[in-house]
Image (cartoon, helix red, strand yellow):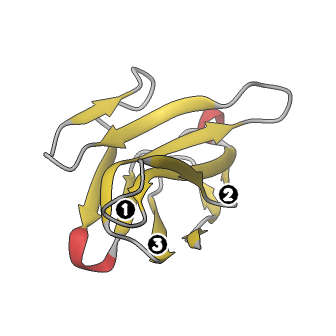
């Protein structure tokens, strides 16, 4: 079994910074890409940032220049450093990862449980 556990959310004032983490655990042979998505109340879940195993990144236009995604391969953990936060960044942040549990298994997409980020004005 594979689990993704997100942590690090909280309440911060506009202009502040926060770092959220997501650790994958369980039977893991390899991890391909990992990423962060967010969902604000009444809105659809949207892409924030992704990071491939090769180091390629992709950011939504709304967070470019403010957010940085990174990964610790040894810990199977992905991070999202969020700087210059705005009230519109308020959302539940979800992590995901494409994971192969054993060498003979196909890649599967797993999601974490989400962590709340609230930015006050």
Q: Is residue 106 left or right of residue 42?
A: left
Residue 46 image point, x, y percent: 59, 28
- Quadrant including the C terminus: top right
What residue did someone put label 3 on? 23
Near-viewer residue (23 or 43):
23
Q: How many marks?
A: 3
Residue 119 image position (x, y, % from top left): 65, 49
Task: Say which residue appears at 35% left-offset and 59% top-offset.
Answer: 104
Query: From what the image shows, is residue 75 above or below residue 71?
Result: below
Query: Is residue 80 left or right of 114 when viewed as pictured?
Result: left
Q: Quadrant of the N terminus?
A: bottom right
Q: Residue furthest top?
A: 61
Task: Determine the residue positioned at 37% across, 62% down.
Answer: 78
Q: Is residue 91 above or below residue 45?
A: below
Q: Residue at x 27, y 62 (%)?
A: 71
Residue 120 visible in the shown view: no
- Helix, strand or loop for disc 1: strand
Give the side of residue 14 with respect to residue 90, left or right. Answer: left
Q: Which residue is found at the position 37% from the left and 67% from the top?
A: 102
- Relative height, residue 11 to residue 35 (above, below): below
Left or right, residue 70 beside residue 117: left
Residue count near mark 3 (Cα–Cα under 10 Å), binned few <14, some 14–19, many ≥20: many
Task: Give the alpha-carbon distance from disc 1 to disc 2, as whole Å.
Answer: 13 Å
Residue 114 image label: 2
Q: Earlier in the sequence, mark 3 or mark 2?
A: 3
- Crowd rating for badge 1 (residues with CA inside 10 Å; few <14, some 14–19, many 20+): many
Q: Which mark is residue 20?
A: none
Element type at mark 2: loop
The residue singled out by tag 1 in the image is: 78
Residue 14: % across, % down: 56, 47
Report the residue that reaches farthest toward the front. 104
């Amino acid at each position: 079994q594979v689990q993704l556990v997100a942590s690090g959310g909280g309440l911060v004032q506009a202009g502040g910074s926060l770092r959220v983490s997501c650790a994958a655990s369980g039977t893991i042979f390899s991890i391909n890409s990992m990423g962060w998505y967010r969902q604000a109340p009444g809105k659809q879940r949207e892409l924030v940032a992704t990071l491939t195993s090769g180091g390629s990144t992709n950011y939504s236009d709304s967070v470019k220049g403010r957010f940085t995604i990174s990964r610790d391969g040894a810990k199977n953990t992905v991070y999202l450093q969020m700087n210059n936060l705005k009230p519109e960044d308020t959302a539940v942040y979800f992590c995901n990862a494409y994971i192969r549990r054993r060498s003979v298994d196909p890649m599967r997409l797993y999601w974490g449980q989400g962590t709340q980020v609230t930015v006050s004005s």
